[in-house]
Amino acid sequence: MAQSSIEWTEMTWNPVTGCTKISAGCKYCYAEVMAKRLQAMGIEKYKHAFKLALHEDALQIPYTWKKQKVVFVNSMSDLFHKDVPLSFIQKVFKTMRENPQHTFQVLTKRADRLLELHEQLPWPHNIWMGVSVEDKRVMHRIDELRQTNARTKFLSCEPLIGELPDMNLTNIDWVIVGGESGRKARPMNEDWVLDIMDQCQMADVAFFFKQWGGTNKKKTGRLLKGRTYDEMPEFNVEELQVGSIIE
């Protein structure tokens, strides 16, 4: 568990670490670089660097949080990786379901396995399910997400490395857009971003612009046409009954 500098969440929780690459968005994976750095620092959880690992002890951590949190789940992995057993995924979901005061944001590139397993998982309102959509080659992930029982569904178009024309945003609640960052960052075209924003506005979907990215993401910032876009999904009545999502 750690406080996060990611603009659309408050903290991260990693009951799984490590992953393998499956699409173009994975090419310069920030989590892989971070895992190697943490291994070099001697952090026990990352002693195997980016090799997939399950952390049973981490399942208890959310029970200890005293204040409501917005939590990015598995920022250092993918919960729906083929080598994560269904039984462990169910344990993670059990922890999230039993802590309704927190909002858990789960993000996967394995939308096919998500769709395969979704009926065997609980979907309370505090679990938001998202898929990564980096270019039009993986737009099928949107349709796979849409077919799940998740109550709040979102897209992370980051790193955005190509256009995403004519997305079907039916039953999608939130779209995050961000450019790749780091020494080898691939460029993001402003027209791609503006087109996604227009699609969100037409479909009445919350739009969040995270960053331009590049080799110096602090310098490029996150202004789009002179302003920031920090929209979030609207909370429904059942969510509000457990209190405000944001501290």
Image (tube, rainbow, N blue to C red):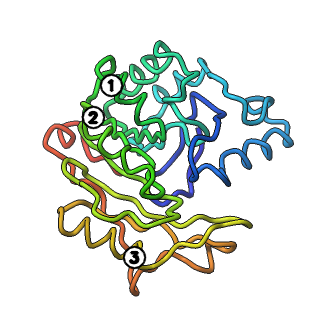
Q: Tell me the tag on residue 118.
A: 1
Q: Which mark is residue 228?
A: 3
Name the element at disc 3.
Answer: loop
> Residue at 43% of width from left, 63% of height from top?
177
Q: Name the one closer to the observer, 83 or 212.
A: 83
Name of the residue lying farthest toward the top: 87
- Looking at the rendered image, the disc whose residue lies closer to the viewer, 2 or 3, is 2
Which structural element holds mark 1? helix
Under circle 2, the secondary element is loop
Q: Label 1 is placed on what type of residue?
A: His
Residue at 40 percent across and 38 percent down: it is 104
Residue to which mark 2 is pinned? 150
Quadrant of residue 32 in the image? Answer: top right
Q: Position of residue 49 (x, y in %)?
A: 77, 35
Q: Which residue ends up furthest to the front in the rendered image?
A: 137
Q: How far apart, in angstroms, are the residues tagged by discs 2 and 1?
A: 8 Å
Q: How many numbered tags mark residues here?
A: 3
In this view of the protein, can residue 247 be seen by the observer? Answer: no
Query: Marks 2 and 1: CB-CB under 8 Å?
Result: yes
Residue type at the position of mark 3: Thr
Sequence order check, earlier mark of 1 and 3: 1
Q: Is residue 240 left or right of residue 212?
A: left
Residue plotted at (67% across, 74% down): 216
Left or right relative to 76: residue 92? left
Q: Are marks 2 and 3 in contact (CB under 8 Å)?
A: no
Does residue 49 appear anywhere in the picture?
A: yes
